[in-house]
C-alpha cells in the first residue's frame, strides 16, 4: 500500500512538473487559419493545443475544480468589496474573499457593478480557496462616487476597445477617453458616463451571434486554447488560455466582448491570411519575442509564475 501511494504521488508530481514547463508558443499551439468560424461581422480563427500537449492544462498551474467569478458571486462563494482608507475607498483596487473550498478564476475585462463606482477587472487571476486577495481594477463610471456603496454583482465583460485601452496603456484616463468616444459614437448622454449604459437594446436583443459561436465551441471536442478575433478589415486581438478548461470557463464573457464590437463598429470580415500570420508570428514565435511584443501590445496574466492568459493586439 505504501509503495502504491508513493508511486501515485510521484506520477502526480511528475505530471505537474511537465505541465508547468509548457508555454504558449508555436511549439505547443497550432493556428487553424484554414478553418475560421464566421458569422455576420465577426470571425474567430481557432487556436488549438498540439496533440503532444493535449491533456489537463498544458501551461496552467494545477487548479482543482475552479469556478468562474460569476458563478462564485451568484452562489455567494466570494465577497467583493472596496478597500477603505482614511480618505475613502481606493478606485483602482478591490478586495475579494473566497469563502468556498474551490478556487475562483477572475477574468480580465469582467465588469463588477456596484460599490461607489462600477469597475472593470484588469487581470486574470486565481483566487485560492479560503483566501483573501486583491484585484487591480479600472473605473468605468467616472461621475458616480456614492457615499453608500452598493453590493457588487457581475455584469459580463467590457467590449474589446475598452479592454484594449486598459491593456495597452494601463491608464485610467485612457479608459475614460475610450468610453467617452463610444458615448459620442452612439450619440448618448449620461450623468455618470457609466459604461454599462452603452449596452443598447440591439446588442441585448441580437442573440444570433452567441447562439452560433457557442454552438460551434461547445459542440466540438477539440482541445482549443484560444482564438483570433476579426471584424471588417482589422484583426481585433488574439486571446489564448493555458488550458482548455480555463478557456471553457472564460469563453462566454470573452465572446460577448467581441460581439459588442462587431455589432457597434464592425463589418463583414475581410482580413487576408498572410496579414493574420504576420501578426501571430509576433505573438507565438518564441517566449522571448512574445514577451517583448505583448509588453507593449497586450498583457500576460500569470498564476504561480506561469502564464495562464495571453491577450495581444496588432500594431
Image: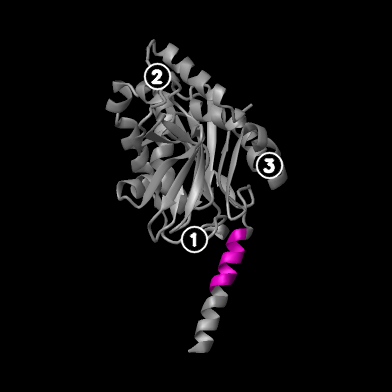
**What kind of element bears circle 1?**
loop
Marks 1 and 2 sit apart, C-alpha to C-alpha, by 44 Å
In this view, the residue in front, 193 or 4, is: 193
User: Residue 9: in sight, yes or no?
Assistant: yes
**Lower sequence index among marks 2 and 3:** 2
Query: Where's residue 119, x and y in %?
Result: 44, 32
Helix, strand, or loop for circle 3? helix
Pinpoint residue 41: horizontal percent, then vertical percent: 41, 25
Given this view, does label 1 or label 2 mark the residue nearer the observer? 2
| The quarter of the displayed image where residue 112 is located | top left
Q: Specify the label residue 291 is tagged with.
A: 3
Question: 302 left or right of 36?
Answer: right
Earlier in the chain: of badge 1 and badge 2, it is 1
Which residue in the structure is indicated by mark 2?
A: 192
For the residues marked 3 and 1, what is the alpha-carbon distance in whole angstroms? 24 Å
Closer to the chain start, of discs 3 and 1, is 1
Please tell me whether mark 2 sits on a helix, a strand or a loop: loop
Q: Crowding at label 3, few (<14), some or many (≥20) Cα neighbours within 10 Å?
A: some
Asked if residue 32 can be seen in this view, the reply is: no
Mark 2–mark 3 CB contact (< 8 Å):
no
Residue under the image location 32 percent in, 21 percent down: 200
Answer whether labels 3 and 1 touch (C-beta < 8 Å): no
Asked if residue 129 lies left or right of residue 53, the reply is left
Residue appearing at x 51%, y 45% in the figure: 134
Disc 1: which residue: 56
Q: Main secondary structure of the magenta part?
A: helix
Q: Is residue 275 within the magenta segment?
A: no
For the record, the magenta segment spans 12-20
Please state the horizontal and vertical placement of residue 222, each as a whole percent of the image: 44, 51
Q: Observer-nearest residue: 29 or 309? A: 309
Contact (Cβ within 8 Å) of mark 1 with mark 2: no
Amino acid at each position: 500500500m505504501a509503495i502504491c501511494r508513493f508511486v501515485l504521488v510521484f506520477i502526480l508530481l511528475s505530471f505537474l512538473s511537465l505541465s508547468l514547463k509548457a508555454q504558449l508558443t508555436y511549439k505547443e499551439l497550432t493556428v487553424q487559419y484554414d478553418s475560421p468560424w464566421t458569422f455576420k461581422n465577426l470571425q474567430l480563427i481557432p487556436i488549438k493545443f498540439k496533440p503532444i500537449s493535449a491533456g489537463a492544462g498544458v501551461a496552467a498551474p494545477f487548479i482543482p475544480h475552479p469556478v468562474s467569478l460569476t458563478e462564485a458571486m451568484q452562489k455567494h462563494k466570494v465577497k467583493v468589496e472596496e478597500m477603505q482608507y482614511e480618505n475613502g475607498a481606493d478606485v483602482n483596487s478591490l478586495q475579494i474573499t473566497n469563502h468556498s473550498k474551490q478556487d475562483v478564476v477572475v477574468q480580465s475585462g469582467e465588469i463588477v457593478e456596484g460599490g461607489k463606482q462600477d469597475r472593470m477587472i484588469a487581470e486574470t487571476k486565481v483566487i485560492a480557496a479560503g483566501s483573501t486577495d486583491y484585484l487591480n481594477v479600472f473605473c468605468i463610471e467616472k461621475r458616480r462616487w456614492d457615499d453608500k456603496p452598493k453590493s457588487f454583482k457581475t455584469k459580463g465583460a467590457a467590449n474589446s476597445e475598452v479592454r484594449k485601452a486598459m491593456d495597452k496603456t494601463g491608464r485610467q484616463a485612457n479608459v475614460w477617453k475610450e468610453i467617452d468616444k463610444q458615448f459620442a459614437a452612439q450619440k448618448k448622454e449620461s450623468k455618470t458616463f457609466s459604461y454599462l449604459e452603452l449596452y443598447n437594446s440591439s446588442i441585448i436583443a441580437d442573440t444570433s451571434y452567441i447562439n452560433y459561436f457557442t454552438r460551434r465551441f461547445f459542440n466540438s471536442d477539440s482541445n482549443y486554447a484560444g482564438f483570433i478575433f476579426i471584424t471588417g478589415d482589422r484583426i481585433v486581438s488574439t486571446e489564448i488560455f493555458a488550458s482548455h478548461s480555463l478557456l471553457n470557463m472564460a469563453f462566454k464573457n470573452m465572446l460577448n466582448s467581441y460581439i459588442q464590437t462587431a455589432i457597434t463598429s464592425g463589418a463583414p470580415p475581410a482580413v487576408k491570411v498572410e496579414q493574420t500570420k504576420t501578426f501571430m508570428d509576433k505573438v507565438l514565435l518564441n517566449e522571448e519575442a512574445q514577451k517583448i511584443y505583448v509588453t507593449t501590445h497586450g498583457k500576460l496574466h500569470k498564476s504561480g509564475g506561469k502564464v495562464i492568459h495571453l491577450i495581444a493586439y496588432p500594431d
